[in-house]
Amino acid sequence: MKPKDFETFLQTLENSSPASDWSLALQSLWWDGKGNWNASHHIAQDLHTPMGSWIHAYLHRKEGDDWNAGYWYRQAGQPFPKCSLEEEFKEMVLAILG
């Protein structure tokens, strides 16, 4: 069962892995929230959806590769963000939680 809000999502980071019934996009963000960029990227790069591209863009922005991030933001139909990484992370989680 997916979390009801961002705070509940953050509490799940105490677990050893995300819930298997979550969407792959939410699992990808969970791994990033847990500090495992590689696991998050592994999922995001195989998500051929606007949300997958947005997560992929965010991850490359996080690693400092703005050129690659820019490509993925365009694929996602998202502008290159002016907000912090933390704010963007929260925005994506909330978008998935609906």
Image (cartoon, rainbow, N blue to C red):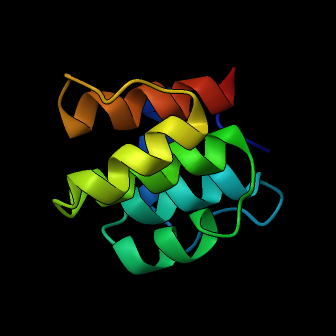
The answer to whether 30 appears left or right of 20 in the picture is left
Can residue 12 be seen from the camera position used here? no
Q: Position of residue 49 (x, y in %)?
A: 74, 46
- Give above or below for 31 relative to 39: above
Screen quadrant of the N terminus:
top right
x, y percent for residue 56:
48, 56
| Residue 97 relative to residue 13: left or right | right
- Image position of 29 (left or right of 87): right
Name the foreground residue: 7 vs 96.
96
Give how far across and how far down residue 71 sits, in percent: 43, 49
Q: Residue at x 36, y 71 (%)?
A: 37
Determine if residue 95 is in view.
yes
* Number of numbered tags placed on the structure image: 0
Q: Nearer the viewer, residue 19 or 69?
A: 69
Image coords of residue 91 (percent x, y) = 44, 25
Quarter of the rendering occupied by the C terminus: top right
Identified at 50% across, 33% down, the residue is 92
Relative to 76, does residue 64 appear above or below in the rendering? Answer: below
Q: Residue at x 77, y 51 (%)?
A: 23
**Where 59 sits versus 8, above or below?**
below
Q: Return the residue nearer the eye: 54 or 28.
A: 54
Relative to 32, say whether 49 is above or below.
Answer: above
Q: Residue at x 27, y 54 (%)?
A: 67
In the picture, residue 77 is in which quadrant? top right
